[in-house]
Image (cartoon, rainbow, N blue to C red):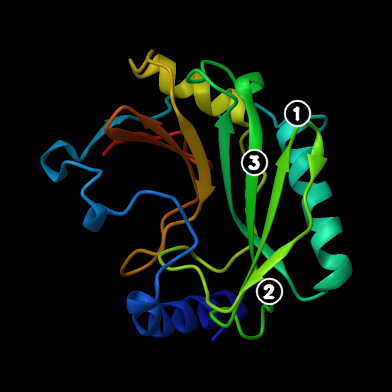
Amino acid sequence: MNQSMKVYVLCFLLAPLFLSGGCPTTTPDAAEGNLESETQAPVAAADDPLPDVDPDDAVFALLGEAEVLVEQGHPRAVLIEALGAPAGAPAQTADDIVKWTFYFMEDHEAPAASTVILEWADGQFAAPQTLPQGIIGTMYERLPRTMTLATAITFMRNAGYGDPFSEVTLRKPLTFPMPREAYYIFKIGAHFVLVGMETGEVTLE
């Protein structure tokens, strides 16, 4: 069994133990009543190859800075989820996202044990905070850098979703039998639009 499979099995076995303890993530959960299950259906998939990732992408640079800062005090930490939000009115572009919250599993050898939370706003990072519980429903893997936020927004718009979004989350959902890919998850009104970071597939939930 390779390391990736070991991590997945550990996540799947441990996640139920934390269902009664709450969860620091703010990403979609059907049990919370935010989604209407009858609307869940694939909307569009990318027909063309994904564009090359911009090496100077501002969001990816920020992810890297967050990792460096957290790893100074938590050398085993791994960034697994990020939540972005605009300052006031809903966002239309990547530049409108000016606040971020980053979620790390503190120890990759004990992924469900604790979470490090790092906030960024007004161009500055706050001090990292540690919670004695793991994140539920998210794969314990480092966030990929295979698609920029700007590209994800373009795919979403091309699929017919032109409305502004109130938040965006990067995460790889823990699904059975195996996780598919990491997504940008845009909250638009009471629904969520998912854009696959590897395939460009757009899905409405």
- The residue sitting at 35% across, 63% down in the picture is 175
Instruction: Calculate the distance from the C-alpha at mark 2 to the C-alpha at mark 1.
Output: 29 Å
- The C terminus lies in which quarter of the figure? top left
- 94 on left or right of 192: right
Pick the quarter of the image with the N terminus.
bottom right
Residue at image mark 1: 54
Image position of 138 with respect to 56: above or below? below
Determine the secondary structure under disc 2: loop
Numbered disc 1: secondary structure: loop
Tell me the tag on residue 163.
none
Tag 3: amino acid: Trp
Of 31 and 147, nearer the camera is: 31
The residue singled out by tag 3 in the image is 100
| Image coords of residue 74 (percent x, y) | 80, 73
Mark in front: 2 vs 1? 2
Return the residue at label 2.
Answer: 106
Q: Secondary structure at mark 3?
A: strand
Task: State the separation of the CA atoms marked 2 and 3.
Answer: 18 Å
- Residue 83 image-quadrant placement: top right
Query: Which residue type carries mark 1?
Result: Asp
Residue in front for this viewpoint, 171 or 134? 134
Q: Earlier in the sequence, mark 3 or mark 1?
A: 1
Residue at 66% x, 20% y is: 95
Q: Count all numbered tags in the image, as a single digit.
A: 3
Indicate the position of residue 138 as horizontal and vertical percent values: 47, 63
Reply above or below: 201 against 129.
above
**Mark 2 or mark 1, which has the lower sequence index?**
1
> Is residue 52 found left or right of 73 in the rendered image?
left
Residue drawn 10% across the image and 41% down it: 38
Neighbour tally class for label 3: few under 14, some 14-19, many 20 plus, Cα within 10 Å: many
